[in-house]
Image (cartoon, grey):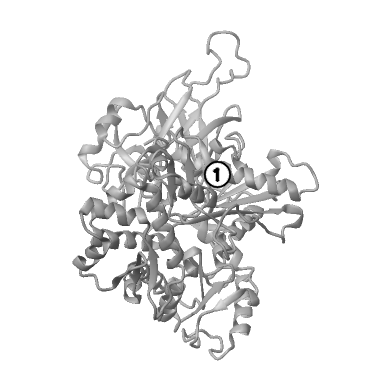
Amino acid sequence: MADMVQPDSNSLQILGDDSSVPSSPATVRNDCSITPLTPSPSPRVEVRPRMACPFSVVVAIDFGTTSSGYAFSFTQDSEAIHMMKRWEGGDPGVANQKSPTCLLLTPELRFHSFGFAARDFYHDLDPEEARHWLYFDKFKMKIHSTSDLTMEKELEAVNGRRVRAIEVFAHALRFFREHALKEVKDQSSSVLEGDEIRWVITVPAVWRQPAKQFMREAAYLAGLVSPDSPEQLLIALEPEAASIYCRKLRLHQVLDLSLQPITNGLELDESRPFDSSFRLWRRNTLQGFRYSISHHTLIHKIPSFQQCPVPCFSLPGGPYGAVGVDLAFEAMLCQIFGEDFIQSFKAKRPAAWVDLTIAFEARKRTAAPGRANALNISLPFSFIDYYKRHRGQSVEAALRRSNMNIVKWSSQGMLRLTQEAMNELFQPTIVNIVKHIEELMAKPEVHGVRFLFLVGGFAESPMLQKAVQKSLGQTCRIIIPHDVGLTILKGAVLFGLDPTVVRVRRCPLTYGVGVLNRFIEGRHPRDKLLIKDGREWCTDILDRFVSVDQSVALGEVVRRSYTPARLGQRKIIINIYCSATDDVTYISDPGVRKCGTITLDLPEPLPLPGAVGGAGGGVPERREIRATMQFGDTEIKVTAVDVMSNRSVRASIDFLSN
């Protein structure tokens, strides 16, 4: 059978217990028994139909960088999306349909509160007592910024104490679970069982597989669903969710920021009023008109929805989002008062530091282009007092010494940020966002996009709206949905009701495994040569499952067959490699890294028909395990079957153990 393998074909692997395809040839030769037996099937096998939603209710949790919330819908009345009720606490005069993403743990590491309740309780603690409590704020993007994310990743509270990140996220999700279940049961006419609820959690599109798996593991730990029922939980990409909702918007539900006529050369009448052109666009989206979305997709004109159905730019968290402005404010404080002082103040007076960030957050929301008067930021008394004791001078003296004329001091104990100061805080983040959108809009694949939707919390900022309108308003209309901060959340509910609404996604990375192929003199390097059983093999060849930017349909699968190295083997472990480019040949090439593992737990093989007695006497010598991997969903999934017996094999994929 080995002679059937062509030199360039993909290969079937034989792996020993707990072994895998390592990244170095020496390890391959010493630790693995891998032999090509038959050509692999086509990498793209079939599209499996999806069943309708089998759940009674869908609950979506929008776990945001700055604020979070939940919404739900009953499948029997899917047109109605129920928003969460008003939260405990909150700011006077503000409709708080979402809560700050902050968590408070007791000194004994037990959950105390989340959101407004956590923020307000922490604010009211005695300063000495507050030093012992653990307050976490805007912690979501910490797991994305970690290059080697594992289940042991820790987060640092404001007071410096560290806790496993998985526990922090689980506490937050458990809080939402309890709130949502109570509200769902209050509005349900029947008793709902746990398996009747589908949960949806939103994540940024820039998150890779480890971060998505981390959020799923946190949901398991929080008790949202059982690991034995993974289909009850969906991971939704924020831009996808927003675009799904935007597709359903009516004219009276959006705000058009554009003041200029459309001048992008479309065949449509450029003088067409906004209302009629928007209605025409909405009808065309249902017919597969061209559309685009930021971060990871560039979609062509096709007859069915690919990736996302409308041009919706959901701004990622971290430096791209409103948190970037917060970081700029902290940098400004360090420039005025000294980085050593700010770090000391955060550690010694953590509650007062939180008060200062809350004061800035409230004023930041009122920043607008052309504002004449300064924004006043209240400094906590403990800040003023601590600085005087720490430095031996007043904060006013520090401002004078810093020569930062754009920040003034008020005798009422306030920093006065001029319009120039606010521009300086906002501009780095806004420039990055506008540049990001401009680069996407300049690509030929999205030529002709007529409507650009801004969504997410930071899209509420007049500073951002004005900058995007100034840059892109000449070529397309800039649209802001009403309740723009809830767009992702509502879209996540719609995604949970029908996960097939996004039919095709583009792969963010190239994925594959390392295999042996027949060695070809002059084509393969000599350092990859492995002689096994008298045959010459080339090691470390990357067998691609999917390639970066490849369009993969929902339900489309990749199949590979594997066989144990020896009889009685109960486990196969296969390393997965990834690359940001497709221009790679070997798993040892620059830019290729091990990113996860597939584990196949093998059942006891069934004896062959007609076998009589003898330990293993009726067991086939070569046992084929066929693994099926699906890349068209928001998460990579794997299943497996024992070909001879047609029995399912327990299969799992892990991106958190590297």
**Could you tell me residue 371's position as x and y percent?**
41, 79
- Label 1, secondary structure: give it: helix
- Whether residue 509 appears in this view of the structure is no
Instruction: From the viewer's side, name the closer residue of 428 and 629.
Output: 428
Residue type at mark 1: give it. Answer: Leu
Residue 578 pos. (x, y %): 37, 46
- Residue found farthest to the top: 614
Quadrant assignment, res 194: top right
- Residues 484 and 24: in front is 484
Establish if 32 lies above or below 165: above
- Label 1: few (<14), some or many (≥20) within 10 Å? many
Residue 649 position within the rendered picture, expressed as x and y whole percent measured from the top left: 56, 30
Residue drawn at point x = 32 percent, y = 43 percent: 593
Task: Residue under label 1, please give it.
Answer: 173
Is 19 in front, or is 351? 351
Q: Residue at x 26, y 35 (%)?
A: 24
Give the quarter of the figure containing the C terminus: top left
Q: Outermost residue toward the bottom?
A: 271
- Residue 512 in percent (x, y) is at 40, 44
Q: Residue furthest front?
A: 411
Count of numbered circles in the view: 1
* Quadrant occupied by the N terminus: top left
Whether residue 115 sits left or right of residue 331 in the image: it is right
Query: Residue, x 59% and y 77% (percent of image)?
Result: 281
Can residue 82 be seen at all in this image of the molecule?
A: yes
Q: Is residue 177 left or right of residue 64?
A: right
